[in-house]
Image (tube, rainbow, N blue to C red):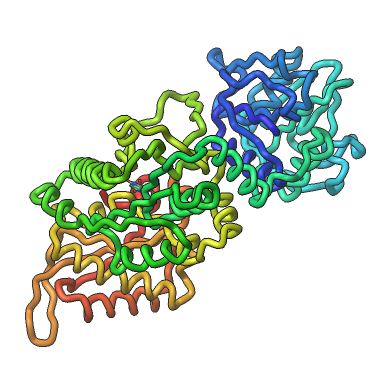
């Protein structure tokens, strides 16, 4: 495997994904406590950082167990660190260097860059530049503005590159990473969905033996793939619970339950909508709503699980981005919203936790899911928040509002599918606003509700942009909603990006 030491760059996860795309396994660890590298480690990559190596409190790392002993590649901050701390000098750039640059090879036969074009586009993002390298370093490639764009240390398998090979705009970046991890580090390219499934199933069998496992299904990709992996490993010893909070999309509970059953899963469907609705009565504050929904979910799940005898494990669909310890060079990041998950359950039920997907990125979860023959209607579905429509009905949640929103949402989603837009949008949904406005229908004055349509592109939900849906499409959706959904007389489209807005309205 490859170790990636994270200095807090926004691109660190991207490095890991590029390496994984080469079917090579890698792990991200914080620069200040990484595991002692053993024989399973074939090479190490140092990430970029929002800090400057010239800052008094710049991240410092003890590279003595690594440098010289393992192939090492420093990217951006990593490269500057290797220059500054071993006898070179890093200075502020005369002009900050962001974006496209053309890299020309100086040492064309160097194994890191030998397969790249003589001149190739790379992506720069740095405010400092390496002004001088130590005597035993050789420049292997330059750009017009950055003479030391790539170097190697004499007699050592240690390289530094000032640009970001992991970003899409570095056209031959993946090839450079391949030279490093495959040709230089000697990694075999055998980390594939098939090999992952095989080894995970074996590990789960060893770990779980004949124990019973309970898992909460949500209809989403992660919990579904986790369930199928466990099902493959332990068959009927996996019991799944799927809770209808009364806040799912229209017909979702029945449809998804049917899909799960057709996948051979042992699923208990629990209808608990009334409990959620009565506990949400009169509650308008968003964080309170989230807490009530989270607490009710745990209660319902717990009550159902208590009916099962001798369950020892709780399985969760946790994925790698939730596991990676974040490196905060600029202070801790604030909690914006409390996300709903089954936190708190394991202690309450005295269960051990098993998380079969904790090593995978989202796109890898989908690839594994495809290999496990999970239907596209589950694998391709948009993310849906844990608290469901409860946080898309602004203000108090009532049965009537749920019904109205379900109808409007179905029209929007069905139209996206019909127009071939569903797969181009990362997430879409409708918000029911606590706003009444005046309208006219026939000769009647109306005073009814307003909904907002939301459709965004994103890769991970952390940042998002609104989708420029065609006007004709929006017109059709608006028309259908107002004509068919009793109680709505106005439709608006949300054109806010995240940040500063969030995807959900509550
Ligand atoms: P926001 O609204 O924070 O949402 O921009 C980002 C992504 O997270 C989803 N989301 C949730 N998912 N439990 C979840 O499992 C939650 O409590 C929750 N709140 C928001 C949201 O749908 C979007 O994809």
Q: Quadrant of residue 126?
A: top right
Left or right placement of residue 221 versus residue 108 in this view: left
Quick check: 281 above or below 263? Answer: above
Q: Position of residue 202 (x, y in %)?
A: 61, 42
* Front residue of this view, candidates 204 and 46: 204
Residue shown at the point (42%, 55%) measured from the top left: 220
Q: Residue furthest right?
A: 109
User: Which quarter of the image is occupied by the N terminus?
Assistant: top right
Q: Quadrant of residue 430?
A: bottom left
> Would residue 147 be seen by someone viewing this image from the given angle?
no
- Return the residue nearer the eye: 420 or 207: 207
**Image position, residue 259 (x, y; %):** 42, 65
Q: Is residue 371 above or below residue 2?
A: below
Q: Is residue 101 above or below residue 469?
A: above
Q: Please state the horizontal and vertical placement of residue 330, each as a whole percent of the image.
A: 46, 25
In the picture provided, is 502 more to the left or to the right than 134? left
The residue sitting at 58% across, 53% down in the picture is 368
Q: Quadrant of residue 260?
A: bottom left
Total marks placed: 0
In the figure, is residue 452 to the left or right of 44?
left
Whole-percent x, y for residue 489 in the image = 18, 73
Give me the residue at 14% from left, 49% from top.
Answer: 280
User: Which residue appears at 28% of the width and 60% of the height?
Assistant: 248
Residue 152 visible in the snapshot: yes
Q: Residue furthest bottom?
A: 442
């Amino acid at each position: 495997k490859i170790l990636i030491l994270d200095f807090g760059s926004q691109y660190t996860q991207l490095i890991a994904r590029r390496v994984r795309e080469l079917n090579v396994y890698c792990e991200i660890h914080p620069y200040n406590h990484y595991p002692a590298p053993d024989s399973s480690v074939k090479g190490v990559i140092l990430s970029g950082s929002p800090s400057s190596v010239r800052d008094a409190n710049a991240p410092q790392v003890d590279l003595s167990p690594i440098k010289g002993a393992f192939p090492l590649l420093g990217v951006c901050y990593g490269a500057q660190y290797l220059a500054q701390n071993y006898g070179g000098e890093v200075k502020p750039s005369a002009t900050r260097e962001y974006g496209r640059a053309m890299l020309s090879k100086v040492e064309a036969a160097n194994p890191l860059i030998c397969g790249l074009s003589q001149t190739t586009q790379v992506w720069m993002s740095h405010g400092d530049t390496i002004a001088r390298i130590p005597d035993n370093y050789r420049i292997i490639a330059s750009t017009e503005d950055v003479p030391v764009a790539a170097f190697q240390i004499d007699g050592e398998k240690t390289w530094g590159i000032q640009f970001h090979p992991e970003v899409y705009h570095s056209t031959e970046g993946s090839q450079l990473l391949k030279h490093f991890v495959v040709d230089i580090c000697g990694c075999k390219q055998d980390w594939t969905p098939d090999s992952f499934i095989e080894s995970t199933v074996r590990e789960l069998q060893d770990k779980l033996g004949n124990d019973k496992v309970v898992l909460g299904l949500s209809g989403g990709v992660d919990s579904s793939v986790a369930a199928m992996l466990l099902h493959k490993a332990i068959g009927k010893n996996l019991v799944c619970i799927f809770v209808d909070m009364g806040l799912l999309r229209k017909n979702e509970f029945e449809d998804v339950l049917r899909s799960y059953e057709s996948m051979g899963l042992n699923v208990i469907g629990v209808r608990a909508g009334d409990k959620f609705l009565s506990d949400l009565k009169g509650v308008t504050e968003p964080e309170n709503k989230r807490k009530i929904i989270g607490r009710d979910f745990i209660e319902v799940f717990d009550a159902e699980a208590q009916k099962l005898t001798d369950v020892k494990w709780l399985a969760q669909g946790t994925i790698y981005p939730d596991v990676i310890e974040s490196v905060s060079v600029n202070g801790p990041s604030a909690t914006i919203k409390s996300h709903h998950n089954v936190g708190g359950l394991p202690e309450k039920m005295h269960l051990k936790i098993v998380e079969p997907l904790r090593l995978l990125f989202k796109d890898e979860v989908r690839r594994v899911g495809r290999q496990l023959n999970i239907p596209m209607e589950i694998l391709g579905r948009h993310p849906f928040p844990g608290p469901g429509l409860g946080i898309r009905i602004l203000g108090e949640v009532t049965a009537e509002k749920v019904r109205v929103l379900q109808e409007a949402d179905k029209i929007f989603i069905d139209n996206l599918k019909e127009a071939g837009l569903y797969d181009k949008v990362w997430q879409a949904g409708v918000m029911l606003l606590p706003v009444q406005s005046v309208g006219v229908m026939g000769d009647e004055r109306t005073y009814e509700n307003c909904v907002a349509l939301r459709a965004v592109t994103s890769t991970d939900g952390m940042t998002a942009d609104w989708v420029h849906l065609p006007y004709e499409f929006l017109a059709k959706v608006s028309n259908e909603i107002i004509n068919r959904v009793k109680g709505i007389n106005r439709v608006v489209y949300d054109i806010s990006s995240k940040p500063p807005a969030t995807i959900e309205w509550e």
